[in-house]
Image (tube, rainbow, N blue to C red):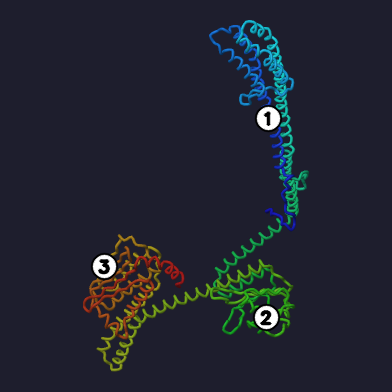
Amino acid sequence: MSLTTPDLADHEAPTLPALRHRLSTRIISLSLASLLVVLAMISCTLWLSWKLEGAGAAINDAGSLRMRANRIGIELARAQAARPNALEDQIAALDGTLALLRRGNPARPLFLPDEPALHAQLDRVADDWRHRLRPLAQDGGRVGGLVASAYIDALPGFVAEADRLVGMIEHDSARKTDLLRLSQAGLAAIACVGTVAVIYLLYLWIILPVLRLQDGLRRMAAREFSLRLPVETRDEFGTLNEGFNRMAGELQDVYQDLEARVAQKTAELARQNRDLEALYEMAAFLNQATDAESMCNGFLQRVMQQFGADGGSVRALDDGRGKLPLVTSIGLPAALAGAPQCVSVSACHCGDATTQSVVAIQDLRKAPAPSGNPAPANPSACTRDGFQALAAFRIGSLRGATGVFALHFREPRELPASDRQLLETLGQHLGTALEQLRLSATARQLAVVEERNLVAQGLHDSIAQGLNFLNLQVQLLADAVDRDDLPETRELVPMLRHGVEESYQDVRELLNNFRSRLMPGELRPAVEETVERFRRQCRTEATLIIDEGGDGLPLYPEQQLQVLFILQEALSNVRKHALAAHVTVRLSNGRDFRLVVRDDGEGFDPAELAQRGDAHIGLNIMRERAARLHARLQIESRPGAGTRIELLLPRGDQQANADTATRLQETLP
């Protein structure tokens, strides 16, 4: 089961909330407002601190007015001292302090508070100094005596005004200090309230919706698909809740028909398993069938049983004549099975399956005429016999269409696509199995023909020549009997006996050769037995040499048998024709397999033997067997110098022909 995204045609695509409704907009606005408030409060405290710092410097300078006025009085008292310019310096310093207090100095900072009373008091101090004390100080410096005393008398009033100025500045600074503390307390309060407000707003905007969504997911996991979350905002969480509600609705719809879907899937899986089982059983049956008729009959029975057909037939395709001869049928009347229109490819619906692969007709009463029949549609033979539905499928192989099989139903029947595909596949399996039967039969026939050819050659080379010799001797014996020539008769009878014994021995040798069957690893015992039998049959001395040190691949059973036949034929030629005193058989299986048979007999001229019309058939038999092994057979002989026969099987050919040898072994009778 999988959940798919709903199409836009079924549900409107969710859109992002408007910019002013977005949660991010509210969070950013709240953050900016908090930042502005904090910056304003910090700016206020900084401004108050700066003002307090300037007022502190003003207090220091205003307090220095008293000190400088007193210093001027001291300098007037000692006007005759050694520092005549000290009085002027003190007067200039006091003038500079008054000027600095009036204009201020933001760089220090130093300035008077912006209170009119403070500036009025500064004006009074400056006027008192400029109009009363300063002239006395300047005159006292030139005259001394009485003027200095007058300066001393006026000094307390100036000092009192300066003290009043300092006190007013200190009072203003104290007020601003209280205001600074109040602003700092307000900043702390705003920070606390703002933190609580931010936490509360974030809880309302983020945490509470997340908790609701989490609870909704938990309840959805408990399969409470009727749950719907409230959509109270137009922000991202509102969009998310809408999506959650849509998902819940889809899940509710899915789980409502889940049982039907499960039943559908179960039925589909059951059908697929049934199809696989049918394919397996059909493949097993087709591999076991031994002839085409029983194979087609068993195939048709199984197909009809599985699909509930009332009748069925299997027909071969005779493409040359355009016919569909019947192979087998079940449940069909004899007249229908052999009807002329059913046998012709172009006159029957079944014939269309040879080109269209599948022909399925739900109701034959409404079906058009076959594609190859231009005549108007008439009631078909199937309809007249009570069948109302037909399904025909091609039987094919690598060679193309080889036939058709058809299922007949007495009620209108529509085959689903899955059944059509299964039946089409079964038709291909049947075609492949029939083709395999044909190829197997052909292979067996070829193997039998080859063996019969070898048997015929062996008979011609041995028994036929012996019988021909006996026929001549019998004719001579008959002539001698007619002439009552007893001496010649006595001379011919031993020759006849010897010829009969030799022919009998040849027959036994041929029978023994063609009954030989070897298993892997049995070549050496078979070779030893063959050489030992040769020793018993004639007086020629035989030596067998087998090289055990080779590491070559072992020969397959068919290869071993052909090697043994070649050895038997070679030794038979030595026994019959060579008149040898000694023969050597050498067998080795190293990098290549090698068999060498060498005798010291009379030998022969290969060129002369090849030109003769009655060429030695035994040599041809050996060459044919070597060709079946893909081996090289070399025959060397000279008159009076014996004969050497060498069979060489390269190691690569042993591997390449392994499968071929195995198949030949299986097909040989």
* Residue 469, position as x, y percentages in the image: 31, 85
Residue 543: which disc? 3
Q: Of 296 and 184, which appears nearest the observer?
A: 184
* Residue 384, position as x, y percentages in the image: 73, 80
Q: Of 263 and 529, which appears nearest the observer?
A: 263
User: Which of the marked residues, 3 or 2, is nearer the chain's N terminus?
Assistant: 2
User: Which of the marked residues, 1 or 2, is nearer the chain's N terminus?
Assistant: 1
Count numbered badges in the picture: 3
Q: Amino acid at mark 1?
A: Ser
Q: Amino acid at mark 3?
A: Thr
Residue linked to disc 1: 43
Q: Which structural element holds mark 1?
A: helix
Q: Amino acid at mark 2?
A: Pro
Residue linked to disc 2: 370
* Residue 243, position as x, y percentages in the image: 73, 49
Q: Which structural element holds mark 3?
A: strand
* Residue 580, position as x, y percentages in the image: 24, 75
Front disc: 3 or 1: 1
Residue 566: which disc? none
User: Which of the marked residues, 3 or 1, is nearer the chain's N terminus?
Assistant: 1
- Is disc 3 surrounded by few (<14), some (14 to 19) or many (20+) residues within 10 Å? some
Front disc: 3 or 2: 2
- Is disc 2 surrounded by few (<14), some (14 to 19) or many (20+) residues within 10 Å? some
Quarter of the image holding residue 589? bottom left
Q: Relative to 255, is 456 on the left or the right?
A: left
